[in-house]
Amino acid sequence: DVKVTQSSRYLVKRTGEKVFLECVQDMDHENMFWYRQDPGLGLRLIYFSYDVKMKEKGDIPEGYSVSREKKERFSLILESASTNQTSMYLCASSRLTASSTDTQYFGPGTRLTVL
Amino acid sequence: GESVGLHLPTLSVQEGDNSIINCAYSNSASDYFIWYKQESGKGPQFIIDIRSNMDKRQGQRVTVLLNKTVKHLSLQIAATQPGDSAVYFCAEFVVELDVKVIFGPGTSLSVIP
């Protein structure tokens, strides 16, 4: 089975703090994604990566950065956390296929609260 | 603009009955659809997928129907069980210059014992 793990299930941070969210997948997937999930808005893509050291902006990259130093690990960084970044953060991974349409497998999520 | 939305935000079903969850999409340049189930406190889990060249796909107790004419996707769960209580949402893969995934907001399914 595909396993995607996230470093924390719950985090509470203060405004202005730097926050690191870690994601690890064990299926040798090329693609990795970071989403945030808010009530009524569904999942919104923040950043994705299709290879080590490669990254692409998603729909809402402002206020976030990412790092992919190893194939299995994709980190989301909030340089200076703000209250509007309080959300559920979901990591996902998928294979890289010719059509690029392949199932994304999700981690359990990290619920971040910024005070 | 492009959107994937669910007609019913909440659905209550008696245990043993069949459930139908609907999803409307607006972009005809779609290639692939996935239904996910998300239980409270957990990440989304893959249930079933369907490609745009298919009308129907069946899994274990679940069936996905795709009607491209009216841009409608549905998930049918047979003999709904309490363990089926969760939020269900559809994901649409739009293939144009690149691949974009659009997620619906979700429908909450509650199974009444």
Image (spheres, rainbow, N blue to C red):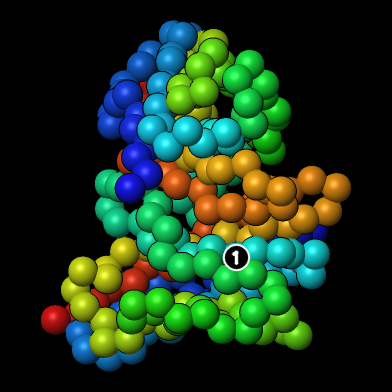
Q: Residue at position x 67%, y 24% from top? A: A55
Q: Mark 1 points at which residue?
A: B33
Residue B22 percent across, percent down from the top left: 52, 78
The residue lying furthest to the right in this view is: B97
Looking at the image, is A104 positioned above or below residue A4? Answer: below
Amino acid type, mark 1 = Phe
Q: Nearer the viewer, residue B97 or A21?
A: B97
Q: Can residue A38 be seen in this view?
A: no
Residue A97 percent across, percent down from the top left: 65, 47
Query: Quarter holding the N terminus of chain B?
Result: bottom right
The residue lying furthest to the bottom in this view is: B17
Query: Quarter holding the C terminus of chain B?
Result: bottom left
Element class at badge 1: strand
The residue lying furthest to the left in this view is: B113
Along the horizontal axis of the image, is A15 left or right of B3?
A: left
Q: Residue at position x 52%, y 23% from top? A: A71
Q: Which of A13 and B38 is in front in this view?
A: B38
Give the quadrant of residue A17.
Answer: top left
Residue B70 percent across, percent down from the top left: 72, 84
Q: Residue at position x 65%, y 64% from top? A: B32
Task: Mark 1: give few (<14), some (14-19) or many (20+) Cα within 10 Å.
Answer: many
Looking at the image, is B71 positioned above or below residue B2? Answer: below
